[in-house]
Amino acid sequence: MTAFLDTLGRVPPLLAQHVLLSAAALLLGILISLPLAIVAARRPRAGSVILGFASLVQTVPSLALLALFYPLLLWLSALVGGGIPALGFLPSLIALTLYALLPIIRNGVAGLTGIDPAVRQAAQAVGMTPAQMLRLVEAPLVAPVLIAGIRTAAVWTIGAATLSTTVGQPSLGDMIFAGLQTQNWALVLAGCVAAAGLALAADALIGLVERGIARRRRPLWIGACAALVAGLLLATAPLWHRAGGDRVVTIGAKNFSEQYILARLIGDRLTRAGYTVRYRDGLGSAVIYGALGGGDVDVYVDYAGTLWTGPMRRTDVPDPKAMVAEIGRWAQATSGVRLIGPLGFENAYAFAMRGDDARRRGIGSLSDLAAAAPGLTLGSDLEFLERPEWAAVRKAYPLRFKAMTPYAPTFMYRALASGEADVISAFSSDGRIAADRLTVLADPRHAIPSYDALLLVAPGRAKDARFAAALAPLVGRIPVSAMREANYQVDRDTGKRTPEQAAGWLATRLGL
Amino acid sequence: MPAESLRFDAVTKAYGETRAVDGVDLSIAAGSFVALVGASGSGKSTLLKTINRLIEPTAGRVLLDGQDVAAGPAPALRRRIGYVFQSIGLFPHMTVAENIGIGPRIAGARPADVARLLDLVALSQAVAARMPDALSGGQRQRVAIARALAPGAKLLLLDEAFGALDPVTRDALGTEIRALHDQLGLTTILVTHDMAEALLLADRVLVMQAGRIVADATPADLLGGGGGAAAQALVAVPRQQAERLRAITA
């Protein structure tokens, strides 16, 4: 219970971002929906196109809709010569706005077409202009139905806003995703309770506005509107005062424990150096490097092979030292990102099996695995099967599995333990490899590149001497054994620690 | 403002191949009470709506006091013409007083004298604050008449205005409308399918059939056997009803 209460402390800043994003998306959605609803009600043919589009948007899963705007905005930004942020607030706002359209338009159209034709005829006959008819007759008659649609849109938007975490926009989803990853259920619960509470409060208040207007009780709906505005201001209060612009740094992390721990380790050092630190957790591999280049993230840890095969599109597998040097040159030249240095350990993709199972089948390398694969099931993390490493491995070893299933990393290890998967795409720095007595398969043909952990800094921080000085002691300092143990403290099922605690332990262990 | 005179010049309204109104030429003197009678689909309502441009004719023109009604903007024209129709169309979100006052309000004129208008249509002052859904059918139609007269209209168009009312209310309201017509010096055109109503209220009865005016006579002429076959077929209905009623008591 105390763990839960502790995590509640993380709610206010995230709630502020969540409310700001949801409110902005809802307002924009209303502004776009109203004229569209009027056009749709007046012209049935245009109406079926408009409603068809809004329904189509609705059928796209909200997570996919958010992800879709990253490449789209990148492309658009390249088209106009840069300057459009592809991560964070903008893609979230666009996706959520699109998501809010359908209920508002649909209710608006239903309200407008539901008006008694006799009332319209009377409005015409007394000499109303179309504008007067809209203002004096249609708007007041449609308002209750329309507001019911806005109410639905508000609840949807607040719910879907939790997913904006994945495109780098802070929201209550940060707590849910981070908690899910590290199996910190108190964190998940706090995030869910806060998001649900917010949705319920918005639903109740907009419900009062709806009732007040339907029953023509002016004090009721004006009071409810005032309460909505007051709630909005109160919830976003933490965003008003920004501690000294330049001194605020954003530390990025992908969506697994090692990344959370390293982010806190970096954060603690920067805090001690006098910076105000914010975290952006749960960013996907595909977006985080772009976020660094664009300055949305100031510093994070990536892995040599990920950059090599991903943004650099390289297929050769050179010697690790040469690879790191080449990455440093490439990052500097293409986006001004500065490579501070490797941290000292590697977190490579590694195919792992249950130790006893591997021995019984006589599998010790990927070559051995190729022969046995048709009878085995591969469990992978969510992105591995789409990654170039997998393509490279398949080219080097003719692997054909009976089945392949992607899991969130935590559940991937469980699937291996329970026998649902026979082979997994593990990570070499994962503490669970030793703890679960897994066998890591050798890669005799060197299909998988090296995955040295690299400390990367945004272009805007590249010349900040104090910043570099705070981070320099981390370079070459972290052995894989220490990283594995820190990871295991967070990932294990009993006696779990938070990423903050594990980062503290790691700092002490390294003598930092 | 004097009661207005109306003239139709070869007014035609076609929907594809069908001609709802087929080349109507007609003059209506200021101050007259004219009934336009015909079966459903004869074009009488369509002809009426060409006056306040709820329907724009395909050909021909309508002159109001010598001015083509199509000359200015439609809203300005409609604010000078009272229009009352069968489905009433009170604004459900406005009180009775707001409904009555809507014409002057949208025209930016002096607010309507709601109390006088309520008196005019024989409604008590108490209904002013009520919402339309709290009124009976007859009361609603009275409010609609008050709303039509509020901007000071001198031309009143009644489009099956009493069609949905019970016979007692209908009879009473008909009589009151005739009295209002005389008292305010209106020009009134009543569209109805009920020949008895037309004969009892109007100075002049027009019969429409398939978009054309086939009879034009005074009630006395019609009762005397004039106006032609189509008109006499309609007059025969109430006459035979009256005779059958008399036979029962005899």
Image (spheres, helix red, strand yellow):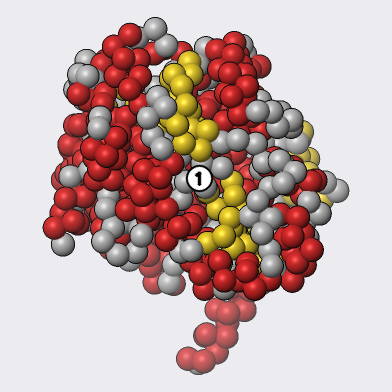
Asked whether residue A145 is in view, the answer is: no
Residue B128 is situated, as x and y percent measured from the top left of the image, at 22, 51
Residue A408 is situated, as x and y percent measured from the top left of the image, at 50, 56
Q: Residues within 10 Å of mark 1 (few under 14, many from 20)?
A: many
Residue at 26% x, 16% y is A247
Asked if B167 appears above or below A471 in the picture, the reply is below
Q: Chain of mark 1?
A: A
Residue at 29% x, 30% y is A267
Residue at 29% x, 19% y is A470
Residue B181 is situated, as x and y percent measured from the top left of the image, at 41, 45
Question: Secondary structure beneath disc 1?
Answer: helix
Asked whether residue A506 is in view, the answer is: yes
Asked if A112 appears above or below A388 in the picture, the reply is below
Residue A388 occupies quadrant:
top right
Residue A50 occupies quadrant:
top right
Q: Which residue is mark 1?
A: A99
